Image (cartoon, grey):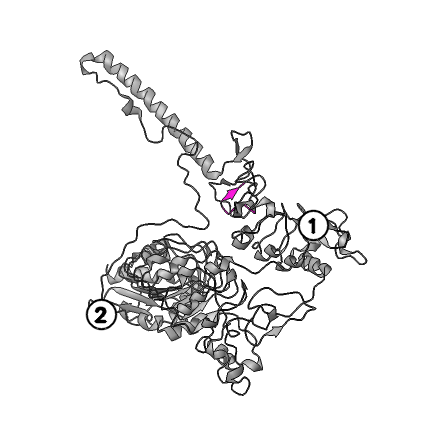
Amino acid sequence: MSSLDQKQIILTIVQGADGKEWAAEKNGWSRDSTVPLCDWEGIMCNPVDKATVEAVELAQSDLSATIPEEYGQLTGLRGLMLRQNMIFGTIPNSVANLPNLEVIDLSLNKISGSLPVFKSTKLRTVLLFGNLLSGPIAPNVGEYGKNMIEYDIRENELTGTIPMGAAAFEGMENLNTLTLSQNNFSGFIPGSLGKLKEMEFLYLDKNNLVGPVPRDLLPSDSKLSEVWLHQNALSGTVPSAFSNLVFLIDLYIDGNKFTGTIPKDICKDEVNKDFFEGADDLVSLEDRDYCQSIACPVNTVSEEGVYPCEECGASSFYNPYLGQSGQCVDLSEKDILEIFFQATNGETWSIDGMNWMRDGVEDCDFIGITCDSFGQVTEIVLSNADLSGTIPPEIAFLEHLHILDLSDNKITGFLPSDLRFTPLDVLNIGGNKMRGIVPPKLCLDEGINGNGKDGQYRCDRIACPVGMYSSTGRSSAGSEISCQNCYDEVQFLGSKYCDERFYLQSPSGKKTGLGLSGKMAITISTISLIVAIGVFIVMRRTRKERMVMDESEQVPMTDEMFNLEGSSFSEGNNMPPPADPLYAGTFPGTGDDSAGHSLPHAEELITKKEKSKKDKKKKSSKKKDKSSRKSHAKKLEAVNSEDKKEQNSANEVWLDVPKI
């Protein structure tokens, strides 16, 4: 490609009046410039031919633009660094397909759309944090990632589960740093991440991950030194396998649903040592509880879920979880109902005779509330009442609650695992807009919706998973109702329908939703059938004419001549099964070991681990410091971050404390 062609392509990022003003202040950056393209500000060329553009480095340059589709024509491009500008729009497929890309840094912009699969087998660094990316991670995200070293997509709006399989992150066999923090990921932590033998830094904090910490994540030959799992909904016990991590220095697990105690062999002075650094005058060596630097014990709280921890007295509600922040509370049932009212936007409920939170009205007299003879709340039935917002975890403190029916509302968020501490017999959350999965501990709670009565514990008896549906939003304990696949991949937990309007009758006589893809399949197949019939008629006529004209030239017509692709229809053809919400498929991985000369400035931009860690923590919300944690304050100040904790749990995890 000539320098003129490259110049025209490079200049496509100069957009509008603001772009022209921006370009006027840069060296080169004009069609009429006499400055050679390779000398333009932010442009780096191949040092051998001194012509091929290999890197565009315009970080922190106040550039407002979209990423041009034309940049996909720069096939020699090895680095695209546009960090901390005002870049908006999506990442073009042409750019994601660049064959020689090694570094892409588009962090701290306003880029939206889906997360692409980059197809360069030479790619080592992907930095996309601090944008507006949405949707799931593709199941083949690591298909071309054999040489990936750092993959950072924190602080976006990404959803779905962390994909598993050889084409997912397992394919990034040289990965050193994986950062998925501060998104909306749900589901389990894949134990297969433990196969990444080069990984030192794993950041999964501030998502909605559930379930135990898989033992496979913590092999004895792991190089993990920093594990951040804080502010999720992980459950079970903290696995002693964390002691396998001989290089571990940071372990943050607070703000989850862990129970039990922290194994003593994890509580070492080299783990989270910053908590006591410089605090010799405040806490003597003998009095230091290194377990509390990982998470406060059950029935205690602190400002950040770690040392110093305050024990909750007998007058407070028992706190069953490790590493909880806030204050010890003593909530009455009416207080809990008020929290529920606020969390579900009670002022907008549509209930005849609405009397919640009215002066002089007792909680047992609230519409939808039933109490026993002792005045204890046993039922909350508020179906089809325009509830929105989220289900607060405090509802688990209703110790006598047997029925919770919040079906057919507009509730969002995730199903709290705390509900396992209630004696629920009926839980109905179908027909809402909740995401994620049913917390595993809740699936094992015998008795909810008849679960476990027949010896089988199934999560779909609590709610149909994302991608499935039933008339009640869950399966029944018998075989009367079961969750069915929805080929339009419904996005909500406990869905009651697949797609509005278009239905077919099932053999049982019940309506079964057929989604958009089903309709398209019928339409395409019908059109194909009509075309095939038309071709058949034309060919038959042609055959007849030929027979009349010259019988000796007649060639017998066979059925194969009319076996046209798409000419037959059977219900369900061409409709792929929906993606399993927990387990992603696998794809064959590819790799390229070819090496070239090192990319100049790109290497500097991407970093030593210290710089990466600093950037990583910078955007986490900074917490208030306490005088008794001066040493930890030093770290917070240095990284401007919310240093918090990470995850846990293994097979011990399924053995939990008794219900409270």
Residue furthest out toward the bottom? 281
For mark 2, does the 10 Å Cα neighbourhood hold few (<14), some (14 to 19), or many (20 or more) residues? Answer: some
Q: Position of residue 186 (x, y in %)?
A: 49, 56
Q: Is residue 277 left or right of residue 2?
A: right
Q: Is residue 321 magenta?
A: no
Label disc, if present, on residue 47 of the rendered structure? 2
Q: Amino acid at mark 2?
A: Pro
Q: Quadrant of residue 556?
A: top left
Residue placed at 31% from the left, 71% from the top? 603
Q: Quadrant of the C terminus?
A: bottom right
2 or 1: mark nearer the eye:
1
Dots 2 and 1: beta carbons under 8 Å?
A: no
CA–CA distance between discs 2 and 1? Answer: 74 Å
Q: Which residues are magenta?
A: 462-469
Which of 654 and 601 lies nearest the eye of the viewer?
A: 654
The residue carrying mark 1 is 379
For mark 1, does the 10 Å Cα neighbourhood hold few (<14), some (14 to 19), or many (20 or more) residues? Answer: many
Q: Can residue 361 be spotted in the picture?
A: yes
Q: Amino acid at mark 1?
A: Glu
Q: Is residue 228 above or below residue 407?
A: below
Q: Position of residue 307 (x, y in %)?
A: 55, 76
Residue placed at 33% from the left, 24% from the top? 535
Which of 95 and 266 lies nearest the eye of the viewer?
A: 266
Residue placed at 60% from the left, 70% from the top? 300
Q: Is residue 2 above or below residue 550?
A: below
Q: Is residue 171 left or right of residue 315?
A: left
Question: In terms of secondary structure, where does tag 1 sit?
Answer: strand
**Magenta span dominant secondary structure:** loop
Instruction: Give the mark, 2 or 1, whose residue is nearer the N terminus.
Output: 2
